[in-house]
């Protein structure tokens, strides 16, 4: 979350480090295709199979004892070489004579005792620290390293002019390892460093500080001391050591790492540094021993702007808390950071304080901190992360007398809201409030500063944002990620809201009108929610498509369906549902219209195809077949009575009786005709079915008259049905006169189909061709049948 005001003090902790990085300008990337990592491989020598184009080579933490020219000569493009934490005892710089591009060489933490010099010109970073050199390993050739920024050295003894060969160089960082430094008691050595921006001195980690050496640096900007062990007896030795180092006017940043001291000596060091030009004092890993008593401290005019103390271990269990806290609370500086300590309280300054920035992260402060404190009138930023705060109402009261407070961070506590019925009281100047990682619920929105611009509430227990809340018209940025919210908040109470972070909640059906109500929104992060991809989400997705991708952070990768199962894991951008499936009214109207169209279509088809006629035929056929089932089995098993049943129109009877019947009977073909073979008393349909079933063949005399006869179609229908039922080819079609296809009514589609699919015999008008016609007729009856007469006489 962005802030209107970033605490300036954070940058000062890294001033010296940035000098190294910017000065060296060497970047290391694990993704570099020319980088080779051979660290922690148990190597005893440099591998010979390294790629020729290797630029970055890491062989740290192995067992390499020596370097030879042949180890490095083939790596002509090498720029970075790490050989720290090995067992190298002798270094001959001529080993690198073929590595003209080598800029970074780390030989720290070896067993180097001697160095053989050789002209080299390319180094920017050279680390020979944490070795066993007796004197500083400086070659006169180092004076040619015009681009050298970092130099790490080790020594047991120092001489004033040890660094003379490089006095003209402008180094960014000098690391001087004095862990093994030794000098006889009451002897003093000196060392002059002409040009260096940062000096880091490392002393023995367990020995009491006893270094008596005068180190002077002309342009020192940052001083860092590591491993300082003090008591009341050697405290003055340490202060005397600092006297020369802090003499120059350019020293702005002073850092102490791993310092063990008595409270009395620590106060003396503070008092010594107070009038010095140091602006930023940093102490990391401080251990207080022996006792803590009240010490006199004169808060004279100082240039110190910021004091940072991180990680205090207090080995004194019985002490005056007032003696401890008063020294810090009365400091006349702008910025104070005391973090990761066992402090349970901090006193309110007695007089109006100069503090503008206070950071008490990871202490054990309670709700009583700064209670009724009216002297922090200039305080602009207060950070109380990771403490023991529990009551948000009391936190608000704490700010009441801090008229300049703009940024308040009380995250990572155990804060709860809603304990008190009365309204919360806040100083109106607060614009940035961090309440994240607490135990706050929905009621927190009734206990907020009225003019707040940036509010961080992520990782709490908020389920909804109440509609009846105090309008936060100035609120611009809201972070409610990692809660249990089920919907996106509207901007009715947050009219200026422009940044919303609401990812990792329980938002399943975000409001479709969110973007309409939040017109000023320039960034929203709402991914990683359990979106239910149903109709309710359709409008929201449609509105997202109209929003710029720059506004919707994480789109589309973090926005995925969680329900239904078939959509789970699918991106919201691929989710689409039709208007029809989501609009019930439209769905009902569509179904009704479809059913109506279907009904009209079916009715039209029925009329067009004369479906009632066919239904009537099927019904009559079924009834006849049902009656047939009741006939005794011996009757069903009798043989056929006729060779052929002839179906024709009465208008064509003259041709049938004068031509067809006489010829067939002359050929001993038994004919079934309706006028002589229909059984009186039975229905016409039943007689037709019986005649067709008792006949081997059915002959249909086709003509325009046949087409117009409904009974002829009955006979054709039943004969065709019998064709499929019996599985035989029993139809003979005779075309007496030509029939036009368009003259056949649509309801007689079987006739149309038969004329298109089956071969028919056409009655020729020329007498000369009729012989062939009759031959084809005879061929259709080439099977000799055993017919049964009506008197059950067998006839061949």
Image (cartoon, grey):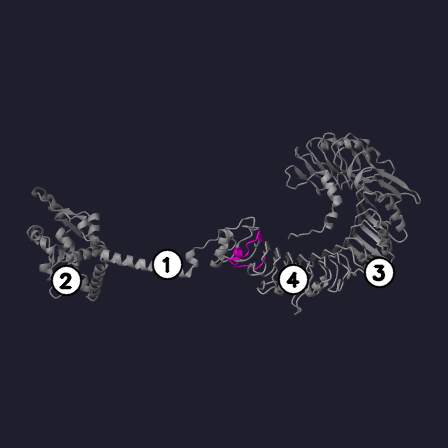
Q: Is residue 526 magenta?
A: no
Q: Is label 3 or label 4 in front?
A: 4
Q: From the viewer's perspective, is 753 left or right of 316?
A: left
Which comes before the other along the chain, label 3 or label 4? 3
**What residue does disc 4 label?**
448
Image location (x, y in percent) of residue 228: 83, 49
Image location (x, y in percent) of residue 613: 21, 59
Image location (x, y in percent) of residue 782: 15, 49
Q: Secondary structure at mark 1?
A: helix
CB within 8 Å, label 2 to label 4: no
CB within 8 Å, label 1 to label 4: no
Q: From the viewer's perspective, is 146 left or right of 37?
A: right
Q: Secondary structure at mark 4?
A: loop
Q: Which mark is residue 417?
A: none
Residue at 7% over, 43% down: 767
**What residue does disc 2 label?**
684
**What residue does disc 1 label?**
590
Q: Residue furthest right?
A: 186
Range drawn in magenta:
503-524
- For the residues labelled 3 and 4, the Cα–Cα distance comes to 36 Å
Q: Secondary structure at mark 3?
A: helix
- For the residues labelled 2 and 1, the Cα–Cα distance comes to 48 Å
Which comes before the other along the chain, label 1 or label 4? 4
**What residue does disc 3 label?**
323
Disc 1 crowd rating (10 Å Cα; few below 14, some 14-19, many 20+) is: few
Which comes before the other along the chain, label 1 or label 3? 3
């Amino acid at each position: 979350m962005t802030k209107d005001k970033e605490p300036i003090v954070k940058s000062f902790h890294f001033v010296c480090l940035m000098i190294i990085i910017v000065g060296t300008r060497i970047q290391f990337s694990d993704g570099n295709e020319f980088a080779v990592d051979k660290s922690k491989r148990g190597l005893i020598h440099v591998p010979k199979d390294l790629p020729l184009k290797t630029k970055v080579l890491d062989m740290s933490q192995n067992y390499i004892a020596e370097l030879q020219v042949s180890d490095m000569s083939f790596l002509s493009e090498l720029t970075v070489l790490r050989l720290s934490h090995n067992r190298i005892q002798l270094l001959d710089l001529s080993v690198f004579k073929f590595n003209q591009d080598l800029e970074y060489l780390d030989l720290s933490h070896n067993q180097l005792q001697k160095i053989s010099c050789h002209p080299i010109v390319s180094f920017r970073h050279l680390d020979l620290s944490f070795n066993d050199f007796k004197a500083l390993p400086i070659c006169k050739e180092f004076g040619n390293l015009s681009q050298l920024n970092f130099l790490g050295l080790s020594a047991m003894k120092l001489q004033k002019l040890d660094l003379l060969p490089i006095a003209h160089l402008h180094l960014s960082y000098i690391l001087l390892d004095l862990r093994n430094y030794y000098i006889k008691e009451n002897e003093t050595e000196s060392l002059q460093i002409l040009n260096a921006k940062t000096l880091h001195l490392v002393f023995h980690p367990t020995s009491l500080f006893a270094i008596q050496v005068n180190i002077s640096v002309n342009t020192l900007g940052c001083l860092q001391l590591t491993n300082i062990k003090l008591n009341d007896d050697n405290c003055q030795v340490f202060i005397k050591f600092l006297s020369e180092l802090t003499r120059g006017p350019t020293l702005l940043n002073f850092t102490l790492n791993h310092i063990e001291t008595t409270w009395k000596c620590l106060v003396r060091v503070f008092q010594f540094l107070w009038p010095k030009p140091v602006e930023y004092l940093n102490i990391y890993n401080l251990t207080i021993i022996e006792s803590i008593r009240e010490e006199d401290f004169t808060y004279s005019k100082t240039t110190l702007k910021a004091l940072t103390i991180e990680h205090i271990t207090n080995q004194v269990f019985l002490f005056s808390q007032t003696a401890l806290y008063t020294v810090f609370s009365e400091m006349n500086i702008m910025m104070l950071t005391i973090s990761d300590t066992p402090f349970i309280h901090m006193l309110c300054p007695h007089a109006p304080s100069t503090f503008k920035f206070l950071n008490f992260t990871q202490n054990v402060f309670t709700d009583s901190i700064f209670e009724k404190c009216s002297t922090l009138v200039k305080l602009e930023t207060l950070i109380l992360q990771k403490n023991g705060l529990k009551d948000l109402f009391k936190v608000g009261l704490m700010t009441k007398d801090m008229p300049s407070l703009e940024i308040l961070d009380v995250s990572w506590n155990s804060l709860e809201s809603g304990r008190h019925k009365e309204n919360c009281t806040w100083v109106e100047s607060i614009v940035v409030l961090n309440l994240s990682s607490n135990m706050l619920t929905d009621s927190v929105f009734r206990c907020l500063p009225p003019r707040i611009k940036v509010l961080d509430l992520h990782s709490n227990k908020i389920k909804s944002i109440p509609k009846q809340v105090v309008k936060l018209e100035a609120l611009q940025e809201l972070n409610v990620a990692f809660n249990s919210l089920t919907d996106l908040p509207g901007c009715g109470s947050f009219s200026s809201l422009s940044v919303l972070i609401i990812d990792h909640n329980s938002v399943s059906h975000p409001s479709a009108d969110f973007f309409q109500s939040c017109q000023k929104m320039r960034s929203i992060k709402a991914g990683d929610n359990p979106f239910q991809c149903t109709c309710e989400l359709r409008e929201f997705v449609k509105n997202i498509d109209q929003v710029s991708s720059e506004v919707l952070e994480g789109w589309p990768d973090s926005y995925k369906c969680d329900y239904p199962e078939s959509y789970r894991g699918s991106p919201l951008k691929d989710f689409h549902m039709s208007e029809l499936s989501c609009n019930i009214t439209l769905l009902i109207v569509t179904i009704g219209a479809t059913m109506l169209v279907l009904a009209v279509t079916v009715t039209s088809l029925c009329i067009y195809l004369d479906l009632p006629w066919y239904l009537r035929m099927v019904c009559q056929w079924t009834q006849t077949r049902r009656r047939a089932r009741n006939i005794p089995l011996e009757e069903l098993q009798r043989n056929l009575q006729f060779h052929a049943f002839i179906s024709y129109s009465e208008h064509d009877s003259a041709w049938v009786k004068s031509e067809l019947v006489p010829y067939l009977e002359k050929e001993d073909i038994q004919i079934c005709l309706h006028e002589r073979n229909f059984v009186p008393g039975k229905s016409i349909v039943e007689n037709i079915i019986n005649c067709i079933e008792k006949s081997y063949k059915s002959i249909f005399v086709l003509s325009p008259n046949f087409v117009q006869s409904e009974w002829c179609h009955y006979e054709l229908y039943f004969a065709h049905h019998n064709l499929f039922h019996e599985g035989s080819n029993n139809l003979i079609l005779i075309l007496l006169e030509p029939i036009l296809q368009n003259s056949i009514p649509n309801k007689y589609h079987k006739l149309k189909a038969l004329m298109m699919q089956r071969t028919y015999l056409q009655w020729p008008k020329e007498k000369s061709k009729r012989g062939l016609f009759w031959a084809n007729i005879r061929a259709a009856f080439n099977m000799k049948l055993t017919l049964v007469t009506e008197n059950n006489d067998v006839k061949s």
